[in-house]
């Protein structure tokens, strides 16, 4: 998934998180969500060092790992608690960051390129191939819902946007399955 779409999903997740006792505002949750959801793609900076190694080993590796997700969540959550000068909100911010990092990993899994979800334990890179890396059919509706949620100051609209995303991904999965059946039938029919 492209970084813009990751940031949009993260903004919706961060905006959707209830404030809890820490009173993290919807605005702060939106900022934390958008920026933190884009964080795993910081590995793009290594592209310029060695493009081939970047593509084969570095991208979608350490910053995209479920194993390392708690480390990144704690570091980024502490960073955000300092940025907002909200030490009492550390736990809530760490939780928001963990959720948006998880959303980044999951939305990269639905593409074909593979993600090292268990790095450094394993270099296995699953990819479901349900959608394109850049998919305006996902990005545009997410951007629209986020804009409306910000304009109307409606957190429920952000939550509805996440439900819409899950439904759209369900449709993608069904379409992928149907396309696979068409391909299999064609191959069997034409030898």
Image: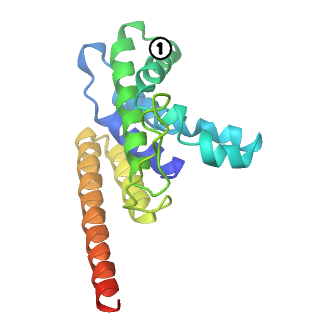
Q: In screen coordinates, is 122 left or right of 169?
A: right
- Residue lying farthest to the top in this orientation: 87
Q: Is residue 35 above or below residue 83?
A: below
Q: Is residue 18 above or below residue 106?
A: above
Q: Depth check: give the residue in front, 67 or 189.
A: 189
Name the image colouring: rainbow
Residue positioned 24% across, 19% down in the render: 20
Q: Depth check: give the residue in front, 190 or 66.
A: 190
Q: Position of residue 168 (x, y in %)?
A: 28, 60
Q: Depth check: give the residue in front, 126 or 84.
A: 126
Q: Is residue 187 above or below residue 113?
A: below
Q: Is residue 171 above or below residue 41?
A: below
Residue on which the image places disc 1: 78
Q: In screen coordinates, is 59 left or right of 107?
A: right
Q: Position of residue 123 (x, y in %)?
A: 49, 38
Q: Position of residue 167 (x, y in %)?
A: 23, 57
Where residue 183 sits, quadrant-wise, is bottom left
Residue positioned 35% across, 89% down in the render: 191
Q: Depth check: give the residue in front, 160 or 3.
A: 3
Residue positioned 29% across, 58% down in the render: 169
- Residue lying farthest to the right in this orientation: 49
Where residue 181 sits, quadrant-wise, is bottom left
Where residue 159 sits, quadrant-wise, is top left
Could you say whether the residue bearing mark 1 is in a helix, strand or loop?
Answer: helix
Q: Position of residue 105 (x, y in %)?
A: 42, 41
- Residue lying farthest to the bottom in this orientation: 190
């Amino acid at each position: 998934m492209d970084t813009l779409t990751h940031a949009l999903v993260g903004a919706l997740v961060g905006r959707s998180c209830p404030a809890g006792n820490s009173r993290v505002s919807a605005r702060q949750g939106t900022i934390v969500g958008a920026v933190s959801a884009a964080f795993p793609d910081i590995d793009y900076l290594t592209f310029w060092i060695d493009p081939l190694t970047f593509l084969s080993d570095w991208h979608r590796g350490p910053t995209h790992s479920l194993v390392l997700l708690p480390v990144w969540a704690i570091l980024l959550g502490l960073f955000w608690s300092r940025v907002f000068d909200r030490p009492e909100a550390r736990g809530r911010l760490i939780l928001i960051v963990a959720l948006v990092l998880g959303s980044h990993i999951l939305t990269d899994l639905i593409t074909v390129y593979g993600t090292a979800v268990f790095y450094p334990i394993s270099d296995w890179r699953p990819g479901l191939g349900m959608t394109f890396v850049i998919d305006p059919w996902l990005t545009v509706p997410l951007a629209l819902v986020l804009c409306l949620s910000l304009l109307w100051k409606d957190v429920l609209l952000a939550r509805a946007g996440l439900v819409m995303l899950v439904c759209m991904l369900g449709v993608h999965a069904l379409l992928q399955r149907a396309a696979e059946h068409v391909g299999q039938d064609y191959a069997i029919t034409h030898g």
